[in-house]
Image (tube, rainbow, N blue to C red):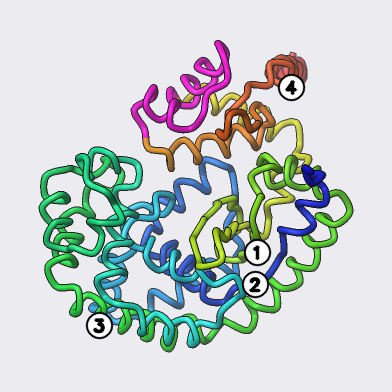
Amino acid sequence: MEIPIKEMLLNNISFAYNEAMEMIIAMGMIACEEQMEAIAEDYKITLDPQASAYHAQARASLSPHAYRELLFFFGYNFLHKAMDNAFYYYICRHQAPLSVESWIDLLAEEPAERAVAEMVWGVYYDKFDELLDGNDWEAVKGDLNKLSLLVAKVQPHTEVAGAQAPLLECLAYPEETKGRYLQLLRVFYKDAFSHWKEPLRQTSEAAVNHYRKLFLANPERFIREINKNEPTLYEFPTTFHISFMSQVNNHFLKAYTEDGPVGWVLFGIHNERIYGPVAEREKTELFLKTFSDKRRLDFLLLLRSRPHYGQEIAAALGITPAAVNYHANFLFFLDLIELKRQDHRLYYHLHTGRLRELLALTAKVMLEEQEEYL
């Protein structure tokens, strides 16, 4: 008997603050600072002054060597999750939230070869079939020499092309790599994150309670309107980590345990503000900005003919799945698209009615403002 959607969501979804997750989010944002500033400008988001202060303090507290190591493991593309995928994966495998110190202790017990293999998956997940070249991932991921040969032959996607040489270095020296990333995590925690971990926890836990109440009031509406996702995606236990550092985020991560799959959603503390009601003027500005970006325009034109799933869109537009998610979030913000599950895939659908509304709103705002000057 099929479980009703509401019951499934109530059974499978929980909300929490995961300290270990928040620290690596912070590390990635600081390493990709220029990209994050460009994203904020694109979305017309002003970074919280406290978050800006944390970024500045972290940069000032790290030695030049520590900062170079931060860029080595995290500094490629925040949305793509490249070599840092290994760190996210080993946090996501634990359904319960982790402190930074307990997580580092657990990570220290993981074989170096396994962690490096997860870095390979992070860099190449959107070119995986090309990378494997007919090999079975479960068989090959334990053979770092074989993985090195495969990585050397296949260029990663342009967004993370700079990760190929560092990844080959990690594959050649797995134990040294493990020592380096454990040292970096400990140094970043001691010199940067530990100084603001309590204010971060308090702020995020207050938001956890707020979003939990919104979810419990109407689970399906919360998933569709604030999480901007298809409710049937949550067929297994999933925890929403409410993140202060990422401010606005809707990133779904999946890992596998002996008991089956588990999920984590990196959920920005200000998602309700961004995906909720916004002033007409701001909506109009962002709507016009949609058409100023060829990829977003092509995205909409592609959906005009029929719904498409993510890999189709990535292939048609020549971008990565991470870039599809990024542009989709922009279009979600304007309620121009929605996700629906069909044949075990999630398809993006165009809201033609909403498109007409925004075109009319744009004309209204622009013509009324023009009249003020007549």
Looking at the rendered structure, the kind of residue marked 1 is Ile
Residue beneath label 1, please? 242
Q: How many marks?
A: 4
Residue 11 is one of the magenta-drawn residues: no
Region in magenta: 294-319
The tag earlier along the polypeptide, 1 or 4, is: 1
Q: Are marks 1 and 2 in contact (CB under 8 Å)?
A: yes
Looking at the rendered structure, the kind of residue marked 4 is Val
Looking at the rendered structure, the kind of residue marked 3 is Gly
Q: Nearer the viewer, mark 4 or mark 3?
A: 3
Report the disc number at residue 17.
2
Report whether 137 appears left or right of 37: left
Residue 316 is one of the magenta-drawn residues: yes
Residue beneath label 3, please? 179
Looking at the rendered structure, the kind of residue marked 2 is Tyr
**Cα gap from disc 1 to disc 4, whole angstroms:** 35 Å
Q: Residues within 10 Å of mark 4 (few under 14, many from 20)?
A: some
Measured along the vertical axis of the image, is residue 340 above or below residue 127? above
Residue 244 picture location, percent across and down:
62, 66
Secondary structure beneath label 4? helix
Measured along the vertical axis of the image, is residue 178 above or below residue 9? below
